[in-house]
Amino acid sequence: MLQDLRLGVRLLVRHRSFTAIAVLTLAAGIGANITIFSVVNAVMLRPLPYPEAERLVFIWSEVPQQNVRERASAYANFSEWRSQNSSFEDLAVFDPTSVTLTGGAEPEQIMSVRASSNLFTVLGVAPALGRSFNADEEAHRDRVVVLSHGLWQRRFGGSAGVLGQTLEIDGMSTRVIGVMPKGFQFSGEDTPVWEPQTVVANWEAQKAQRGTGSWQVVGRLKPNVSLRQAQTEMSVIAQRLEQTSPDANKGLGINLVPFYMQLTGSNVRLALWILFAAVVFVLLIACTNVANLMLARGMAREREIAIRMALGAGRMRLIRQLLTESTLLALMAGGLGLFIASWGIRILIRFSPPNLPHLDSIAIDGRVLAFTIVVSLLTAMLFGLAPALKVSQVHPGSALKDGRGASGGITGRRLRGLLVIAEFSLAVLLLSGAGLLLRSFIRLQAVELGFDPAQVLTMQTAPPQNSTADQWRGFYQQVRERIAALPGVESAGLTEEIFISGNPEGVITVEGDSANNSTPARIPFRRDVITEGVFQTLRVPLRQGRFFNAQDNQGTVPVAIINETMVRRFWPGQEALGKRFKLGSVQSSNPWLTIVGVVADMRRQNLERQPIAQIFLPHQQSPERRMNLLVRAAGDPAQLAPVVRKEIRGIDKTVFIYGSSTLESRLAGAMAERRFQTWLLMLFAALALLLAAVGIYGLLHQAVVLRTREIGTRLALGARPRDVLWLVAGQGMSLALCGIGVGTLAALGLTRVLASLLFGVTPTDAITFIAVPSVLLLTALLACYIPARRAAKVDPLVALRYE
């Protein structure tokens, strides 16, 4: 083995050009694999920081009729689940929400998880400092809080004396009782503060609510209880609740999702596996290129190998020597690939979407290093074995006589041709997947939003927690009027929420419809409070009726504006203006709302999802404390932010202001994940295309070298240069066509796994499957042209003397 290694090193050093090309080609493929595997390792393979994490399960309400599998639940339903099941050691409940943290230079909006006192016990973790809140504090609705390690460092400098100190959250003094361990994350996010579930303002109403709500549930399975057994039991409980509370629980099921799957999300996992498959394809293409190089180099060494065989070397001995050289190449490429990956990971983290879980933990660790070694050795076998087997078949007699052996004959040319076919087949697969995602991205960008986000500034505002509803009315009316009057402002308005998150659902009762009065309709819908000027600022088309005005106040009939989806749901083909409905059942105390306007559908929930029913109420009739300001600027909206802040402070110095951004940037953030997936796959597809072109160019270049005498003879016997051009180009194009045909057939089947990531196109999109072969054919033609042109210019006199 040492002799083989010494010889291998000597040969690789002697043939520096070959070594450099092979190492760089392989390093590109190996580096891409290490980079993506590092992400897969951090997101999906690294163990969760919880004891026996495989027993942790998320428990969701589901509505199978609407294909909704993960909906938050009402608290009363959670209580029933907890008391009736026998599959779980315990269930805990939590509700992530945004709160305002004061006491610093500026108010800060942060995430808070309001949870049951047993949540940390269910997870199997404990605060690193202090303790978590207990059942008594929960029952008494005490204002206590557990901090994240990051907030503890940032606000208290990591002081051990933090326990007993206070924070002001939403204007309320809250006592610090614990600090979580460094690096602790829940639901894939860094949560700065943890509070008891009972601190919510409407706790008693929340506690009694049934059906769906805002609470998420996590449980720990008992030992030896499978997920399937637990799912069966919970489905029975769901049927039981539907019978006892049909109004709230009709059609509601229960869906169990393993904790580790919930943290990543099905689309994230699918996208990562697709990217990993893409880089594997790139590596395979790189291996076929290097295999072709090895075959060509083997031809140059046939005389050497023939002499070795004539002196008694066995075939296995020769194969071992050749595989040793391949292994040295692969290990060198692996080392360079590791260096490339270290840079690739930094670039990936910089440009990756912020919602990618465990983003900060992506790094080259022991598992990644082991993967590098394994993939390098496998690569050596992939590109080295076939050439070693073929070159070791050399016939000493013929090789010593005329320099043509196994690798230079017909079988050698066939093997190299098969490698090129494989390259193009893999390139078709990669380009087809990238093309489908690119087409989806283009379609998504062309979606009609229903509003105009250009030149709109947004920021969130909230008066202090102890302010009253009348104060909210007066404050927001002044804000809207004074901001709208600023120079450079075209219009302004305030809305409770800009975008819709989750799967909101509720009951709506329509007046005058006996069916709906007796059986209220439970549908997905969103209710938002807005001021005057919102629709004008967003340039939302008015389909019927009017917008809100100053007359829609406390002393007038409650009114509402709805969208077209709601009209189609309840009044198809009818005039909706003047119709009345209420939120909730007919027995609820909510007022009847009169429809005064219908606006166009807005894609506020997700650009890829169809709009749900949307209901808008005037702020003067239904005041809310926390609102989002929308300002349409005549110029750059970002330049207005300081002026708007100063104006709001002039109205009330105690108000909280945070989250200033443009509406376009917020939309871009919503598209970040899909953009990242698309361009990353496009990058790998472009690399595959380049490698495939290099592969066919190398094959034809070598073929021209080997057939120089034959080409010279043809030209001497009267063949025209054009005939030689077509002969050589035809050889390369026939291989490319075979590869494209095989790859297209495979892509038609394999691209179906992309279905859940596509928007507006099918997995068999005709444009993609016409464009991809066309691009590859053009690439193959360009790669064939240079060797074919060289062959056509061969001088017959020189060629006939060529050895």
Image (cartoon, grey):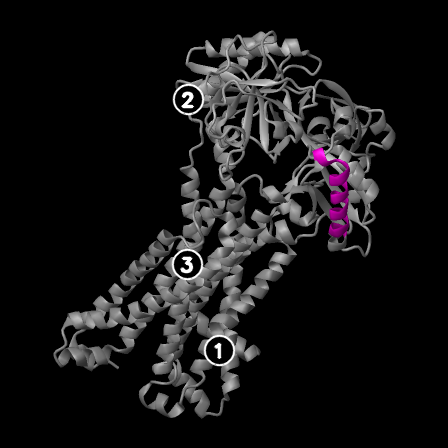
Give the side of residue 356 with respect to residue 597, left or right: right
Q: Eyeballing the image, is 514 above or below 408?
A: above
**Front-lying residue, 773 or 67:** 67
Mark positioned earlier in the residue sequence (3 or 1)? 1
Check disc 2 and report the residue beneath it.
636
Front residue of 105/113: it is 113
Q: Residue at x 71, y 49 (%)?
A: 48
**Marks 2 and 1, how far apart at CA:** 65 Å
Tell me if label 2 and label 1 are in contact, CB under 8 Å.
no
Q: In the structure shown, which secondary structural element does the residue marked by tag 3 occupy?
A: helix
Does dot 2 land on a helix, a strand or a loop? loop
Q: Is residue 323 visible?
A: yes
Circle 3 residues within 10 Å: few <14, some 14–19, many ≥20 = many
Rounded to the nearest angstrom, the CA distance separating label 2 from label 3 is 42 Å
Residue 234 lies in the magenta-colored region: yes
Q: Which percent across, then down, holds residue 180? A: 76, 37
Among all residues in the image, which is located at the extreme front? 514
Q: Magenta residues?
A: 230-248
Q: Quadrant of the N terminus?
A: bottom right
Inspect this view and state whether residue 31 appears. Answer: no
- Label at residue 688: 3
- Measure how far apart labels 3 and 1 are at the Cα level: 27 Å
Residue beneath the point at 34% across and 54% down:
771
Q: Nearer the viewer, mark 3 or mark 1?
A: 3
Q: Residue 147: within the magenta?
A: no
Residue linked to disc 1: 322
Mark 1 belongs to which amino acid? Answer: Leu
Crowd band around label 2 with a 10 angstrom C-alpha radius: few (<14), some (14–19), many (20+): some
The C terminus - image quarter: bottom left
Residue in the foreground of this view, choosing between 508 and 308: 508
Residue 76, quarter of the rendered image: top right
